[in-house]
Amino acid sequence: MLEEKTMASVKFLGHASFEIELGGRIIYTDPWWDAKPLKMERLVPPGIQAESIRKADLIMISNEKPDHCDKFDVQRVQEKTFAQVLAPDPALAKLELNPKLRMTAYQGDSFHNMGLDITVTKAKQPQSQYPAGYIVSAEGKRVYFAGDTYDFFEMHEISVDVALLPIGGRETMDVISAVNALKMLKCTYVVPMHYNTFKMIQANVREFEEKAKKGGRAEPVLLRVGESFSF
């Protein structure tokens, strides 16, 4: 029997943070919603504040860096919502969480939780202690959150509806390598992320859109901070 497909959505919250609605669950990726961080100038403000979140089921964190794992934001959301937190050990080590609501992400693991099928993927990022990406699926829809990563050969094995890919360069894929990743991935839509938040990761998103369309492997969806996309 074929799995029935229902609508799902992705909302861009800035940098590498998204709100994903899938299978009746609300998932947040890489919470970092500090509009004025101390150690860097944030050029594009976040699309949400932790205080405004009323419901969350799962928080997925890709690595331990402060712009992907903000202790205040993660803990504030979990305290209010009792969301489960899935993250590599170096990220979990930064957080003070209810032990019952934390799960360690190991590359290659797959499991079923809260009606969601979750696979922890490889991420290629030597500057992180243990980077990870995630494929999450429910009700016939699949989303790949790449996290901080360069392109890698095993992307050939990933087949999803939506891929969330970094394009800003400097310790992640840039525009060219993200387009190369699309040649390996099997995805219907691609949403660029992790660009233009700081001066050091500035990228021409229109160039990415043009090159991705020319490749014809996936339809690029450019989201401004705060915008949503349903699929």
Image: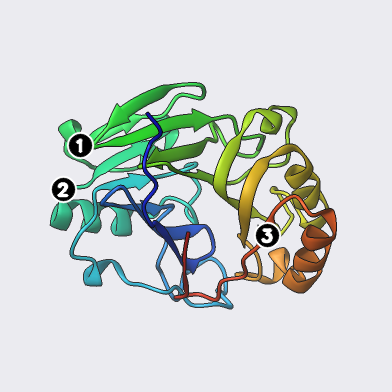
Comparing labels 3 and 1, the label whose residue is closer to the camera: 3
Horizontal side of 155 relative to 223 (left or right) equals: right
Residue 82 is labelled as 2
Q: How is the image coloured?
A: rainbow
The kind of residue on which mark 1 rests is Leu
- Of residues 24 and 226, the one drawn nearer to the viewer in this rendering: 24
The kind of residue on which mark 2 rests is Phe
Image position of 88 with respect to 225: above or below: above
Horizontal side of 111 relative to 96 (left or right) equals: right
Label 1 to label 2, Cα distance in Å? 7 Å
- Quadrant of the image occupied by residue 198: bottom right
Residue 101 is labelled as 1
Residue 219 is labelled as 3
| Sequence-earlier tag: 3 or 2 | 2
Badge 1 marks a residue whose secondary structure is: helix
- Of residues 100 and 164, the one drawn nearer to the viewer in this rendering: 164
Horizontal side of 148 relative to 101 (left or right) equals: right
